Image (cartoon, grey):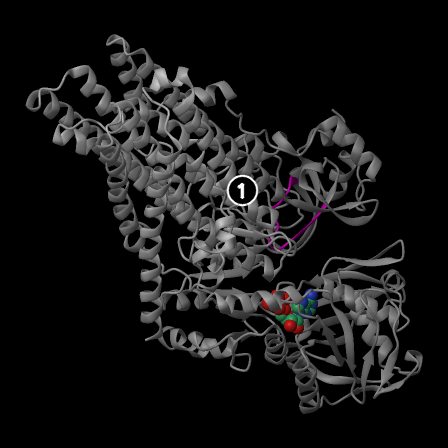
């Protein structure tokens, strides 16, 4: 076997980077787009197979696998034996409607989750045609050159080509939770997976450093593909509340069945009622009492919420978040990009002698330089060239022009520095050709600076540094002067950067130092000595107009907003003031936080809204301190080190655009547009969803209990049933698919964002809602019996009296629905009375159904009904109105009482 053949067969980890590139017919500058397209067509997408979905038929059949359905099917068997064909037919219809409802909710929930998953599809940074591009990870092909940085999820199996301090967490593959260091040295062909230091495997997380890697396997060919072979399936749409309600419904079913059996025995043995009649009554009672459709309607309510949030760019990753987000009492938010636009522009330059300002707009590299207020030619200012050089070379961003519109690839702040350099007359591409980068220390929120080592063609080498002024100043031992180095005027620089920060500008300091040409590696120690400060740069980043409004909304909604930023205290205060935070002046810095013990911290965070120069570790302490004060905390984050705080927060929120994959994975919610206003919209949607869940429950439970009580009372008293079992089954059938669903679609109630957040431990079924359920459960049978006795008193036939009773029940349900729509405010406003299309559609459908049952002769036969006169129809509506008035009055009294208590 010749050497070339041996290499062909060698695994990528046993090859040198060059040999690996050759084996995959690639190049350090990556593939060109055409070749990538050809390979993608031949190789298929970089995707793991989706879990197979069950066929629709199987999913429909699965709906019948449910205790209640078994009971109902057993009942149809008994009624069929008793030759009660109509009853058998109606019960079967109830079974079918329930199955279809369950099927529909599952479909809707699955679609909602699928859409969410698609929105979270990861992107990869890849070199194509020599340019850095972000492409969907599924489009990667073997031979692509991928760029990795801290926080990324490795998108395919990679042979590393170059590394700077790369550390990868490989727990998914090896079970080892400690991050391992990577380098480019080839290892033995037989090395175990965990020992292949030159490989980064698909699905693992980059916890630090930067690297370039060659894609050697994609999709099912990757190591993770071989192990699991499947994508993790979509998370089911369940929340604690839903689980609680499903359990509740299951227990209730059991209880009702036991009660029904006792009632059956009591009626048969004690009251000696005929079995067939009694059995049907008990079945009717059970179907009425069991809220069989409730879990399905609740799931639909959640699915609608998930979809509505996704439409507003808030992607729910973990289902419980949709409930919790509505209860949030404090939002801890990042500044840059969330409260501000993250469209940076350099506005100020400070040198040892002067202060310059630079005009312009966006990323267009045109602008005028003013020195101390007067226009000046940049070429006449010697310090500006080195400033622009450092700003351009200690920089990973790219400027991009298309159709006269300029944009940035990479960090917007670095983009703004490139624009600045161009305004000062230096082109970064030209600079990059002249000064090639040999090594780098990437920016990290911990050390807050970035440094590069660059060499030029004339064998000169320089270290370039940019970063937070305090940090850079601490590293510098002198300042640049056209004639050489001079002593550092620390006080001058400190007062300068504080003045620029106080204007709300983000300040960076730029520094450099020449080093011997043979330096090829850059270490932290290399910055310790001889660094010369060049100047300061101030960048403006205007606050988002919608964030200002959203902060005001939070205030109305009783939600505290706290800004946690890595930026300077001065900048943070200025921006906090602009966006309208409650207490912009009271600032705690990361250093202050380090001084406080946990107890003092709990006190301090309550009265502070701005936290500056913090590191990700501070976020975790802040979350815990706020939670200790019983706050429900939403925390935003984007960096690799934000994951613990996001996990710990009640609602962890990651940024979709600027966020790392590891932040997104730790988060419950992802904001696709990084916007604070979207976060507040998610809170609003969360409150709506929770209210609607409550409304669905508050409508369904008294309805079913009221219907059941109507029958129970008659059975216990041995009186005539005001509603026959078939009629009860009918009502269940028609209202389940109409009124029962309407509340899932309810829009936000008017004052929802003016209510304080609900308490963490607020039980759903206690208090107001429980009382309401009880009240209406009793009022329903009262209404039915009043109309029934009235009809009998008028000498009507029993059929007519029952028809009136049935219609009364339905009319009361409709009025109750209108009441439930505004559980927290008055229902007698034009807006409330106007209803929504969904409400009117469902009301129209039920009304149509009731008219049919009341007036169509064939249906009269089946349901034992008789035509109702207009006058009696008005009586029925009158009872509905009476119910509405009673419960509305009770609500108004309750609200007034609450307000009085609140005022006191
Ligand atoms: P915010 O909350 O406003 O988004 P942050 O917490 O993300 O801010 P960092 O990005 O950690 O803040 O930045 C903290 C400081 O580090 C900045 O004020 C700036 O001085 C410096 N800095 C930020 N990005 C870079 C970079 N790419 N290179 C060098 N220094 C940087």
Front-most of 758 and 895?
Answer: 895
Q: Is residue 173 visible?
A: no
The answer to whether residue 813 is above or below residue 606 is: above
Report the image quarter containing ligand 1: bottom right
Q: Quadrant of the C terminus?
A: bottom left
> As drawn, is 718 to the left or to the right of 57?
left
The answer to whether residue 902 is above or below residue 815 is: below
Q: Residue at x 85, y 62 (%)?
A: 432
Q: Position of residue 445 (x, y in %)?
A: 60, 66
Q: Which residues are magenta?
A: 146-157
> As drawn, is 744 to the left or to the right of 245?
right
Q: Is mark 1 within 8 Å of ligand 1?
A: no
Q: Is residue 156 magenta?
A: yes
Q: Residue at x 47, y 61 (%)?
A: 751
Q: Position of residue 885 (x, y in %)?
A: 35, 51
Front-most of 91 and 816?
Answer: 816
Q: Residue at x 37, y 19 (%)?
A: 860
Q: Quadrant of the N terminus?
A: top right
Q: Position of residue 533 (x, y in %)?
A: 74, 81
Q: Is residue 626 visible?
A: yes
């Amino acid at each position: 076997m010749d050497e070339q053949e041996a290499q062909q067969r060698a695994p990528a980890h046993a090859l040198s980077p060059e040999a690996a590139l050759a084996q995959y017919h690639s190049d350090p500058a990556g593939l060109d787009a055409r070749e990538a397209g050809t390979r993608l067509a031949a190789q298929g997408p970089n995707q793991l197979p989706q879990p197979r979905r069950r066929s629709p038929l199987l999913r429909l059949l699965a709906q019948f696998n449910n205790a209640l359905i078994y009971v109902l099917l057993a009942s149809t068997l008994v009624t069929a034996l008793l030759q009660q064909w109509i009853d058998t037919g109606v019960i079967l219809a109830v079974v079918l409607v329930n199955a279809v409802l369950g099927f529909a909710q599952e479909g809707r929930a699955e679609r909602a989750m699928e859409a969410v998953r698609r929105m979270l599809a990861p992107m990869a940074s890849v070199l194509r045609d020599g340019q850095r591009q972000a492409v969907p990870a599924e489009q990667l092909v073997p031979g692509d050159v991928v760029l990795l940085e801290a926080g990324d999820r490795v998108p395919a199996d990679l042979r590393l080509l170059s590394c700077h301090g790369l550390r990868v967490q490989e727990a998914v593959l090896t079970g080892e939770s400690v991050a391992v260091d990577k380098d480019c040295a080839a290892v033995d062909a037989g090395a175990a997976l965990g020992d292949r230091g030159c490989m980064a495997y698909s699905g693992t997380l980059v916890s630090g450093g930067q690297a370039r890697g060659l894609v050697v396997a994609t999709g099912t060919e990757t190591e993770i593909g071989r192990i699991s072979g499947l994508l993790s399936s979509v998370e089911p749409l369940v929340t604690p509340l839903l689980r609680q309600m499903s359990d509740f419904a299951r227990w209730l079913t059991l209880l009702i069945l036991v009660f029904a059996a006792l009632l059956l025995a009591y009626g048969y043995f004690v009251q000696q009622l005929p079995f067939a009649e009694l059995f049907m009554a008990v079945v009717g009672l059970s179907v009425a009492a069991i809220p069989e459709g409730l879990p399905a309607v609740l799931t639909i309510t959640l699915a609608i919420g998930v979809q509505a949030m996704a439409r507003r760019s808030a992607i729910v990753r973990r289902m419980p978040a949709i409930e919790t987000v509505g209860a949030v009492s404090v939002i801890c938010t990042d500044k840059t990009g969330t409260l501000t636009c993250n469209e940076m522009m350099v506005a100020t330059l400070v040198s040892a002698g002067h202060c310059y300002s630079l005009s312009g707009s966006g990323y267009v590299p045109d602008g005028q330089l003013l020195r101390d207020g007067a226009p000046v030619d940049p070429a006449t200012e010697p310090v500006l060239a080195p400033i622009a050089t450092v700003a351009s070379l200690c920089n990973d961003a790219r400027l991009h022009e298309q159709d006269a519109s300029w944009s940035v690839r990479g960090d917007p702040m670095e983009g703004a520095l490139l624009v600045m350099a161009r305004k000062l007359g230096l082109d970064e591409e030209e600079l990059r050709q002249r000064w090639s980068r040999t090594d780098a220390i990437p920016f990290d929120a911990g050390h807050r600076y970035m440094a590069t080592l660059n060499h030029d063609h004339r064998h000169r080498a320089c270290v370039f540094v940019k970063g937070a002024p305090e940090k850079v100043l601490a590293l510098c031992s002198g300042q640049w002067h056209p004639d050489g180095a001079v002593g550092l005027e620390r006080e001058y620089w400190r007062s300068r950067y504080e003045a620029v920060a106080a204007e709300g500008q983000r300040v960076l300091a730029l520094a450099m130092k020449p080093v011997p040409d043979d330096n090829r590696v850059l270490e932290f120690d290399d910055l310790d000595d001889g660094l010369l400060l060049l100047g300061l740069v101030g960048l403006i980043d205007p606050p988002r107009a919608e964030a200002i409004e959203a902060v005001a909304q939070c205030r109305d909604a009783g939600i505290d907003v706290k800004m946690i930023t890595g930026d300077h205290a001065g900048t943070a205060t200025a921006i906090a003031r602009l966006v309208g935070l409650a207490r912009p002046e009271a600032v705690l810095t990361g250093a202050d936080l380090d001084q406080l013990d946990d107890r003092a911290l709990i006190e301090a965070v309550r009265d502070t809204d701005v936290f500056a120069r913090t590191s990700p570790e501070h976020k975790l302490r802040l979350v815990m301190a706020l939670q200790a004060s019983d706050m429900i905390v939403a925390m935003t984050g984007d960096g690799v080190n934000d994951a613990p705080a996001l996990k710990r927060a009640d609602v962890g929120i990651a940024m979709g655009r600027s966020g790392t994959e590891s932040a997104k994975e730790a988060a419950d919610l992802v904001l696709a547009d990084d916007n604070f206003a979207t976060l507040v919209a998610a809170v609003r949607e969360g409150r709506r969803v929770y209210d609607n869940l409550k409304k669905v429950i508050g409508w369904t439970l008294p309805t079913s209990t009221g219907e059941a009580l109507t029958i129970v009372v008659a059975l216990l008293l041995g009186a005539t049933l005001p509603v026959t079992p078939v009629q009860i089954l009918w009502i269940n059938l028609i209202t389940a698919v109409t009124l029962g669903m309407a509340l899932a679609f309810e829009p936000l109630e008017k004052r929802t964002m003016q209510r304080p957040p609900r308490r963490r431990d607020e039980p759903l079924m206690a208090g107001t809602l429980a009382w309401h359920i009880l009240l209406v459960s009793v009022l329903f049978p009262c209404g039915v019996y009043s109309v029934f006795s009235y009809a009998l008193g008028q000498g009507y036939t029993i059929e007519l009296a029952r028809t009136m009773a049935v219609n009364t029940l339905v009319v009361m349900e409709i009025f109750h629905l209108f009441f439930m729509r505004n559980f927290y405010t008055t229902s007698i406003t034009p807006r409330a009375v106007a209803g929504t299309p969904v409400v009117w559609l469902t009301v129209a459908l039920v009304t149509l159904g009731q008219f049919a049952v009341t007036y169509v002769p064939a249906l009269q036969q089946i349901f034992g009904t008789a035509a109702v006169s207009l006058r009696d129809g008005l009586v029925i509506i009158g009872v509905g109105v009476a119910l509405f008035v009673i419960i509305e009055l009770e609500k108004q009294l309750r609200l007034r009482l609450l307000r009085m208590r609140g005022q006191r």
